[in-house]
Amino acid sequence: MCLAVPGKVIELEGNKATVDFGGVKRDIDVSLVDAGIDEYVIVHTGFAIQILEEKVALETLELWRQMFEAME
């Protein structure tokens, strides 16, 4: 099973970006997409593989939050 997670690009330098996953920040590779600062991307194994509309990204993040909350 593969897992891809949405995050927001907060810094960008060449093909590297810092992405915020709801407070957890990671450096990822954006060479596969044309992402800009403040855009949401789907990240899999350290690579942004798709740009998401903000509304879709926020809905997905809310579902993740609800799922983790239910697990507690």
Image (cartoon, rainbow, N blue to C red):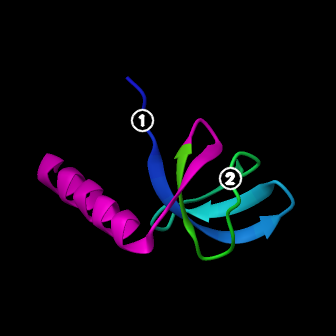
For this orientation, the residue located farthest to the left is 70
The image quadrant that residue 56 belongs to is bottom left
Viewer-side residue, 60 vs 68: 60
Q: Is residue 50 magenta?
A: yes
- Quarter of the figure with the N terminus: top left
How crowded pointer 2 is (Cα within 10 Å; few <14, some 14-19, many 20+) is rated as some
* Residue at screen point 71% across, 45% down: 32
For this orientation, the residue located farthest to the top is 1
How crowded pointer 1 is (Cα within 10 Å; few <14, some 14-19, many 20+) is rated as few
- Considering only vertical position in the picture, is 8 above or below 71? below
* Residue at screen point 55% across, 51% down: 50
For this orientation, the residue located farthest to the bottom is 38
Query: Could you give the CA–CA distance between mark 2 and mark 1, rounded to whole angstroms?
Result: 18 Å
In the picture, measured across the screen, residue 48 lies left or right of residue 54, that is right
Q: Which residue is mark 2?
A: 33
Q: Position of residue 64 (x, y in %)?
A: 28, 55
Q: Position of residue 26 (x, y in %)?
A: 64, 55
- Considering only vertical position in the picture, is 58 above or below 31? below
> Which region of the structure is painted magenta?
44-72
Name the disc covering residue 3, or none: 1
Q: Is residue 17 magenta?
A: no
Q: Are marks 2 and 1 in contact (CB under 8 Å)?
A: no
* Residue at screen point 16% across, 46% down: 71
* Residue at screen point 28% across, 66% down: 59
Instruction: Report how many numbered discs are placed on residues in the image.
Output: 2
Q: What secondary structure is found at the residue carrying circle 1?
A: loop
Q: Nearer the viewer, mark 2 or mark 1?
A: 2
In the picture, measured across the screen, residue 72 lies left or right of residue 35, that is left
Q: Position of residue 2 (x, y in %)?
A: 42, 28
Earlier residue among tags 2 and 1:
1
